[in-house]
Amino acid sequence: MKKCERLDETLIKQMMEILPGNNTIIRMADIFQALQSETRLKLLFLLTNKDMCVCELTYALDVTQSAISHSLRTLRQLDLVRVKKEGRYTVYYIADEHVRLLIEMCKQHVIEEGK
Amino acid sequence: MKKCERLDETLIKQMMEILPGNNTIIRMADIFQALQSETRLKLLFLLTNKDMCVCELTYALDVTQSAISHSLRTLRQLDLVRVKKEGRYTVYYIADEHVRLLIEMCKQHVIEEGK
DNA sequence: TAAATATATGAACATATGATCATACATTCA
DNA sequence: TGAATGTATGATCATATGTTCATATATTTA
């Protein structure tokens, strides 16, 4: 394809330079990738209300304990949730406010587009 | 698996009830699904700076025009970007502030976790 | 120390996804 | 009207993903 008349190569190149670096983009893609699963979204919404152990989360959602653990690992690896031990239980909680805002922002977008 | 002693069934059921509805969850998952592609993230970052036609976007990124169009369609269908005609060109732009905030929030999370 | 409970992991499989190629469609302009 | 340009679409294919089953690993308690 030829260059169209709108195309200002210099400008575009400048824009490419101020893009976030490739590592950042990849990391962001990984995070969104994790958030794209209904199961993981529900886990995050649950943890938004209350720190919970794997047991409780398994009871709440209609998937196997194995699936919950796998999903939690994914979220943990991206630092979207964190873990603490409470006696014999492994309790998960939301990592930080960015995570809350991220899903809240998306929820707002969805809710408002219905209007 | 048996119920663990932490489990308060009534409480969990209440929590399930205040979760966003299934349609909302599915829609959110679709949006995050779209944001999980490096190509689509880069498109959004570019459009954050300037409304651009398919030509320009194709020039900027290292994928085929076909791939760009497919990606733009995905973003359009989720109302993450919108379209306007300018002469012979189809110009894309970011749909609303939620979208900007969404990717900005994720970027912050990524940048700050490096610290 | 054995049994029970809580959680994590690996393998396997069916499904979903993104890129490309080929091509169609639409608009402009000569 | 025909050629050129700009954009969209469908088919295909290789790869990635989420779930389950089976099992391993901790940790607690009898």
Image (spheres, coloured by chain):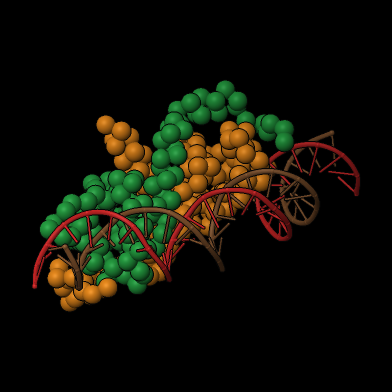
Chain colours: A orange, B green, C red, D brown
Left or right, residue B26 beside residue D6? right
Left or right, residue A76 beside residue B108? right
- The residue depicted at 55 percent of the width and 28 percent of the height is B12
Q: Where is residue B97 in the image (x, y as percent from the top left)?
A: 23, 47
Q: Which residue is farthest top?
A: B10
**Viewport quadrant of the C terminus of chain B:** bottom left
Total marks placed: 0
Q: Which of A74 and D17 is in front in this view?
A: D17
- The residue depicted at 40 percent of the width and 69 percent of the height is A23
Q: Nearer the viewer, residue B96 or D24?
A: B96
Q: Nearer the viewer, residue B43 or B110?
A: B43
**Viewport quadrant of the N terminus of chain B:** top right
Q: Which residue is farthest bottom?
A: A10
Q: Where is residue A67 in the image (x, y as percent from the top left)?
A: 63, 46
Q: Position of residue B70 (x, y in %)?
A: 36, 57
Left or right, residue D22 beside residue A7? right
- The residue depicted at 46 percent of the width and 54 percent of the height is A33
Q: Quadrant of residue A108?
A: top left
| Vertical position of residue C29 compared to residue B14: above or below | below
Q: Can residue B112 be seen in this view?
A: no
Q: Can residue A41 be seen in this view?
A: yes
Q: Where is residue B86 in the image (x, y as percent from the top left)?
A: 13, 57
- The residue depicted at 31 percent of the width and 70 percent of the height is B61
| Vertical position of residue B113 compared to residue C2: above or below | below
Left or right, residue B110 beside residue C15? left
Q: Quadrant of residue D8?
A: bottom left
